Image (spheres, grey):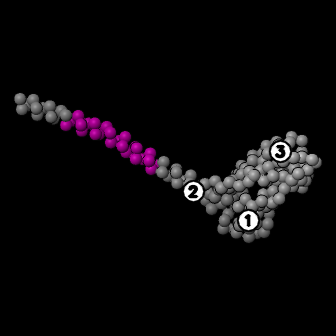
């Protein structure tokens, strides 16, 4: 009877060892997955979004607030550079363009850039300004009309 018990105990021990060997790669993969997830989370936190707006165009030709163009967006800092994203909306559909102005300052002076749309404009990854170049100011203004200077709203700080 003791031989049967010894054989049975040996078989149980061998089975548990085999089960342990089979589980070990899964445990290692699970740990690697956790590390990868933690790294991705740190990167996501590094590139957090800083929202600004909405900024509206001025009133013109009897328009009400519901017909004004507007812009809203966000900025990120990636690798020491500032990137800007956003959406420009023309809500009155009067066949006049909507414009969004960007004005910024760095050690080289003041600069402006204008985007326009009829309807909806998506501004994707504009900028790339280096913080080390003295980039310290960023403003936004929205205009609407036949010219980029028509019915402009006030300059708003986005940064």
Q: Residue at x 75, y 47 (%)?
A: 87
Mark 3 or 2, closer to the camera: 3
Q: Is 130 situated left or right of 119 in this image?
A: left
Give coordinates of residue 50: x percent, y percent. Answer: 65, 55
Residue under numbered circle 1:
137
Give coordinates of residue 25: x percent, y percent. Answer: 35, 41
Marks 3 and 2, Cα distance to the nearest angstrom? 37 Å
Say which quarter of the image contains residue 138. Answer: bottom right
- Mark closer to the chain start, 1 or 2: 2
- Tell me if residue 22 comes above or below residue 116 in the rendering: above
Magenta span: 13-36
Dot 1 crowding, Cα within 10 Å, few <14, some 14–19, many 20+: few
Q: Is 98 situated left or right of 157 in this image?
A: right
Give coordinates of residue 121: x percent, y percent. Answer: 78, 45
Q: Is 115 situated left or right of 8 in this image?
A: right
- Tell me if residue 133 comes above or below residue 150 in the rendering: below
Marks 1 and 2, Cα distance to the nearest angstrom? 21 Å
Q: Residue 46: which numbered mark, if any?
A: 2
Residue under numbered circle 3:
66
Q: Residue at x 84, y 48 (%)?
A: 65
């Amino acid at each position: 009877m003791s031989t049967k018990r010894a054989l049975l105990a040996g078989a149980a021990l061998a089975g548990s060892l085999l089960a342990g060997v089979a589980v070990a790669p899964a445990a290692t993969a699970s740990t690697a997955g956790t590390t990868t997830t933690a790294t991705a989370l740190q990167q996501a936190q590094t590139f957090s979004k800083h929202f600004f707006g909405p900024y509206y165009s001025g009133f013109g030709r009897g328009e009400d607030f519901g017909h004004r163009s507007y812009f809203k967006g966000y900025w990120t800092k990636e690798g020491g550079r500032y990137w800007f994203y956003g959406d420009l909306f023309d809500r009155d559909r009067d066949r006049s363009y909507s414009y969004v102005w960007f004005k910024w300052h760095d050690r080289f002076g003041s600069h402006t850039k204008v985007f326009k749309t009829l309807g909806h404009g998506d501004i994707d990854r504009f900028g790339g300004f280096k913080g080390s170049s003295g980039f310290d100011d960023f403003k936004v203004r929205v205009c609407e009309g036949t010219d980029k200077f028509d019915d402009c709203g006030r300059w708003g700080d986005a940064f």
